[in-house]
Image (tube, coloured by chain):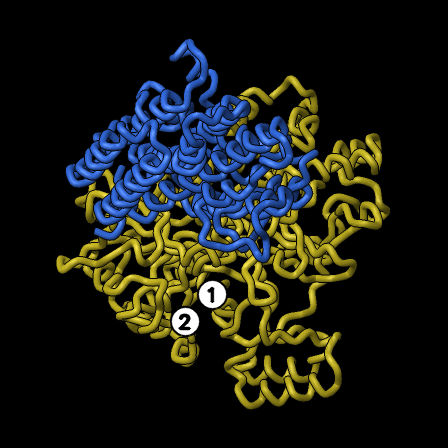
Chain colours: A yellow, B blue
Amino acid sequence: MDELLDADGSPRPIARDLIELLHRIGLDDVRERQRVSDLEILTMGISFTVYSDGENIDRAWPFDIIPRLIGGDEWSVVERGLAQRLRALNRFIDDVYNDQQIIADGVFPAALLEDSANFRPECRGVHPKFGVWAHISGSDLVRAGDGQLYVLEDNLRVPSGVSYVLENRGVAKRAFPELFQRHRIRPVDAYTDELNKLLVSLAPADRSTPTIVVLTPGIFNSAYFEHSFLAQRMGAELVEGQDLVVGDDECVYMKTIQGLERVDVIYRRIDDLFIDPEAFLPDSMLGVAGLMRAWKAGNVAIANAPGAGVADDKCVYAWVPDMIRYYLGEEPLIPNVPTFRCMYDDEREHVLANIGDLVLKPANESGGYGILIGNRATVDELEAAAAAVRADPRNWVAQPILDLSTAPTLVDEGIEPRHLDLRPFILTGEHSYVTAGGLTRVALTKGSLVVNSSQGGGSKDTWIVDRDESDGPANGHTEQAVQSQSQGDR
Amino acid sequence: MALLSRVADRMYWAARYIERAEDSARVLRAYGDVLADLPITTSRWHPLVTISGSDVQLPAVSGSDENQVAQFLIAEREHPNSIVNTVDSSRENLRTCREVLPREAWQTVNDLSIYVRGAAVTSVERRRRDRFLARVVDESRRLDGVMISTMTRDEVFEMWRLGRYIERADMTTRVLGVRAATLLSVPAGTTDEFNEVQWMGVLRSLSALQMYQRSTRGPIDGPSVVRFLLFDHRFPRSVAGCLAEMRTSILRLPEYSTVLGAVEAADRQLRRSRPAADDGAALDAAMEGVQVALARLDRVMHEQYVVH
């Protein structure tokens, strides 16, 4: 299905003005607006880094000017669903590093935890503030042929992309000013302020005006632009491992021109295996020796907490609906993609019998590695996969092949439907916050499902559009308009 | 708010590199302008390579070929002080301290870097060169304008100023050491009808002609040009003026005593060069003395604020 057009190709009510505008101005004007936007992205230095031919290259961020629209009513449910999901996931993480009640109660299999590559025994017994470990997360949503939004996966370690949500909006406002005047589009700019509030709330109790830093692996990281962007927008320091040191008092300090200054909250954008050579990989050059000691002593907060990744492998994913019921006593508001767990005999038999119609995923790989798409695999590949499942059933899950939704996208051939997904960002602390929309990633190649920007994917601005009772431009706009204007100036 | 040592270092170097690009562009522009007025036989491009302070040798070039020298100074990737390289170095340093920069400042340097990378090679040729060099100078000044009009006067800002002024002082001593020294060395009694044109070129290469004339109100005279560019602290490109600006910035930084000491030492070295203002050979040596003092100031700052 298409996000903006119905089955017979006419615009859905929410997208009527946009589609009419595209028709009215014509393809040449659309291309001209795209060209202006591309130029703006280039000169503003909105970039991402790709590694190619042994070199790290700073590339202009790929952006398709035609936005993707979602109705405000639907989004309000998604917001609550994501907040619910992250509350449950955080309860789970806190539980597995402490009492492991969910295992004792037989809801979650002990064996899975033993196998998990992301379970960090070093974190046992730690209780971060509010019981929250995954403070900043991004869950990937896809809309299937039945029109339903599903959670495809949760990213609880160092999810990236939120800076582009904010930058895309800035560019889109200038590309389609006429639509922003007519519609109630929820602003996205508040994110960095919400993030700042969250990070401040995590500081050790005795620190009144906490010092917050963003810890980056450095300029060669693919998300360096974002690390810099977030530090800039929060007025935080952007530090590398070499800028920090842990003192004899087990506090973290940064090296300033006046000597050492105490750090209270670290928003780390380094994988947890690299954050502390003393506790994890001893030859990591990116981390800070002693950071884990400082964290366990409660002298510094780390977001996301080390070990939070235990809840985002592809097997654990299958248990999230059960976690929501177990910890919160609620029904999940957004469904998982149906997932077969090969460790159970009946589910494994189903997978082996229907392997050609399923997507097979190994538990502990990320970035799409090791994934087998049944209907695109050769007979030999399918046989090898079936053997792998039989040999190590606990490492495999399978899902139906989804028919991802599309949206009209400007490509060389004109405006054509292309597949997309959506990554909203969720902040969890004492309270929850969900971005209005998120990062829509689009596969620019016809028929392709690969949306990664490093592999030729693009992005779109995502508009959460609230219905306007009177449909008149003068009514009901005031508050929204004033708000987005004041935020646009920052 | 405390300033990270690493960020301080990068701001300082970003400022030095952009100032270096701006100054080279200005020197090259003024030199081309002067040579257009001189008879072909006196055209010598090699002094510009010396001014740009390069140890890199021009590959198989005597330094007399205008296009080769211009290509070396503008677009040569092997030459660390070429305009493409210095603009890129400034951008790369600022890219790692965007969190402390006004957004427009980053956009200005990014914009300039995109322009320079695209236009450098085709701007070597004389017909297009002036436009290119003018833009480099303009954008560098725009960057300063953004900083001055939008940045809080904190330590980040002072690091930027320090980088700007130390580089500028250094460039003024180089121009004087190479070009003024040569002009002063013209044997007594010989009258060079182009002498005045050449001194005007020296002043122009430091954007100083107009201000010099306002301050002297007389014909152009070599030694007074040298004295103006070294000692008139009211003129912002004079060495004394740059040292005064650095002193102001240093007093706003923490634990500045050793750094201030290094500025005073450079100032003493500068004052010692006063008698050299009408002697070419002595001037060249005196300028080297000031350059050494500036290099020591750079090292002292690095030790005080970056490495501890």
Quadrant of the image occupied by residue A231: top left
Chain under disc 2: A
For residue B9, side relative to residue A297 (left or right): right
Q: Earlier in the sequence, mark 1 or mark 2?
A: 2
Q: Are marks 1 and 2 in contact (CB under 8 Å)?
A: yes
Quadrant of the image occupied by residue B163: top left
Name the one closer to the observer, B263 or A127. B263
Instruction: Look at the picture and state if A6 lies above or below B163.
Output: below
Mark seen at residue A118: 2
Please state which amino acid type lies under the numbered disc 2: Asn
Tell me residue A235's x, y (percent).
Answer: 37, 38
Can residue A277 be seen by looking at this rendering?
Answer: yes
Q: Tell me the element at label 1.
A: helix
Please state which amino acid type lies under the numbered disc 1: Asp
Chain under disc 1: A
The residue that mark 1 highlights is A312
Mark seen at residue B92: none
Tell me residue A267's x, y (percent).
Answer: 36, 51
Identity of the residue drawn at 44% across and 40% down: A192
Identity of the residue drawn at 72% across and 75% down: A357
